[in-house]
Image (tube, rainbow, N blue to C red):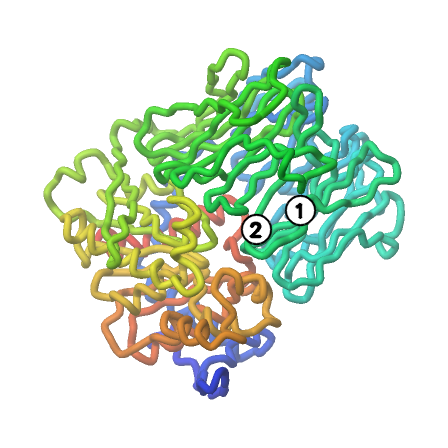
Amino acid sequence: MASVPPRAPRVPTERVHHGDVVIDAFEWLRDKDDPEVIAYLEAENAYTEEQTAHLDALRGKLFDEIKSRTLETDLSVPVRDGDHWYYTRTIEGSQYGVHCRAAVAGPGDWTPPKLVAGEPVPGEQIVLDDNVEAEGHDFFSLGSFDVSPDGNLLAYAVDVVGDERYTLRIRDLRTGENLPDEVGNTFPGAVFSGDGESVFYPTVDDAWRPDTIWRHRLGTDAADDEKVFTEPDDRYWVGIGLTRSKRYLEIALGSKITSEVHLLDTTEADASFEVVWPRREGVEYSVEHAVVGGEDRLLILHNDGALNFELISVAPDAPLDRSRWEVVRAHDPAVRLEDVDAFANHLTLDSRRDGLTRVSVLQLGADVTSLENAPFAELEFGEPLFSVGTSGNPEWQQPTIRYGFGSFVTPSSVFDYDIASGTSTLLKQAPVLGGYDPARYEQRRDWATAADGTRVPISLVAARGVFDSGAPAPLVLYGYGSYEASIDPSFSISRLSLLDRGVVFAIAHVRGGGEMGRQWYEEGKTLTKKNTFTDFVACASHLVASGVTSPERLVAQGGSAGGLLMGAVANLAPELFAGVLAQVPFVDALTSILDPELPLTVIEWDEWGDPLHDPEVYFYMKEYSPYENVTEQRYPRILAVTSLNDTRVLYVEPAKWTARLREVDAPVLLKTEMSAGHGGVSGRYERWREVSYESAWILDVLGLAD
């Protein structure tokens, strides 16, 4: 067993940009084919195991608590697609789900069957058993999953390494046997053509960017697949899909700040893909096909002169003719429009207002011939904090809208909203075993004030009475703050183990995320990125100053780009935190964004700036990149977790960061999963063990491990 922290040898590597000479002592850790690198990671794992061995019993207890609260044999709510209801079973003792279906009773059957865990469903068919596909592998991830329009074939893709390289296969659901067709090294997102005779799928370039769409005709050799589209610009991702109406095949291209959509009309025999709006730098848009008053329309959600986006309706044959545009929902600086869905008889609109998600509905009656200023009706919910969004709505003719709802205290719930009656029916609420009572917990919203006067929202949840105790409580403060991603209040079974021990859980909705609209994102990216870090510090300071917690009882947590946030605040304000949990952390940001050969780097320039060609960006990033700014100071306890096969944030970033922190005697631990990807280990039991591991470490830092 290791008795002292491992020390990585210093092997100086020189890097010169914009006249700035940097000597990087630990860049050698990038070569994971080097036995010395693997030996170092294994030594770190051994040291971490030794230093946390006293938590073994607690980890087991936390795992048992998660397991005891979870209905292990369960079913998802069935979703109608074509002539079948599709659902997923989870079975006690099995790591992965089993995808099943059962036939609908008839064309007018829109009421999902009531399924009972452990009981057979008449006529049930297993479409795909992930446990069978995962046999013999330490890791398993299901990528593509699409059923042909006639319901006879399944296109699915699996990754059994964790490097996000998926093998695409076709299964005949009438026989249960796979066809000879097999395509390697695909990216998720394969879809059948409208006639079911072909499968379209994306592949990636050397930088792991989905750049090409291929067409595989069933029964042919993959080597003969047709290249349908390729995008040479390194900033753009490419994907393909069918509109809900099945009228159009859609190729969507997107960088971080620019979009372009190509449509192919499947009703025209000789049709080709046509651009809806040619790309313009900084203009983002998405396209939905609708039928209004018997006429085809394209619904375009865009930000051209509309920071929080605007929804317009245009004719398919003249999408650029502004004189024929109908403004369906005008730009509103207080409402961020996020998504629109079109059905035969209604539309839905997902948006965000006051930092919370919203869902609105519009009925398309026979008398509706124009969508100009359409009167969408927003659904109302009775909790101060919540998350809501439409999902599971594949059918064009369906008379209902499926949406999910949840909060810190309300378990994830699935509803069907009946368009005609305007009523919602609860189909299922995620079961929580052991007598869960939401009244035992309370949630609230606080506001911190940033250095520039900006008010930053904080969402909190705790066991009832903790907020009123008058004593500083142990608290976990979570943050992300990048890519306009919003971290909304949601329920977590594993979190109950912390709440029941008196821990407060809080989310700092810092700039760089999307919680408060597009401007919130703009003020936390590229040359304003430091706002993300100072906002988080302001939230921590507010919680301390208001008496909710104290520095010795405060742990910061974040992953991926949120791991960058963790590394930055550990450098900026180490005195505010007792511990920092950094999950797959992006802590060597400058080195990564400087290298266009690394996966996804060029795409990231719209988010972080281009330090390779712009000296202002280079020196700005150098001022905050965690690895670059480790100094001689008192650091809080740090746990960094990573995965050897992660293709998004390479393991080398936390490995280098840990090595540098060791040089200033920071109390840091590094845990590397040797067979996992960016999302960590696979399999629900393994994920529970990972959560239990991290939760035990948090409780230990907070003095609650006994």
Residue 463: image location, x then y, percent: 24, 36
Q: Secondary structure at mark 1?
A: loop
Q: Are the two marked residues, 2 and 1, in contact with CB atoms closer than 8 angstroms? A: yes
Q: Is residue 498 left or right of residue 512?
A: left
Residue beneath label 2, please? Answer: 283
Point out the residue furthest to the left here. Answer: 470
Residue beneath label 1, please? Answer: 277
Q: Secondary structure at mark 2?
A: loop
Quarter assignment of residue 641: bottom left
Most foreground residue, 601 or 326: 326
Most foreground residue, 486 or 489: 486
For image coordinates 73% across by 42% down, the residue present is: 263
Type of amino acid at the residue the image marks with label 2: Val
Residue 587: image location, x then y, percent: 42, 67
> Spatial distance from mark 2 to mark 1, Cα to Cα?
10 Å
Residue 502: image location, x then y, percent: 22, 43
Q: Quadrant of the N terminus?
A: bottom left
- Count of marks, rendered view: 2
Q: Is residue 55 left or right of residue 183?
A: left
Point out the residue furthest to the front here. Answer: 323
Residue 293: image location, x then y, percent: 67, 19
Can you tell which mark lies on residue 458? Answer: none
Query: Visible in this render: residue 42?
Result: no
For image coordinates 63% across by 25% down, the residue present is: 343
Q: Earlier in the sequence, mark 2 or mark 1?
A: 1
For image coordinates 49% across by 22% down, the residue present is: 375
In this picture, is 489 found above or below 484? above
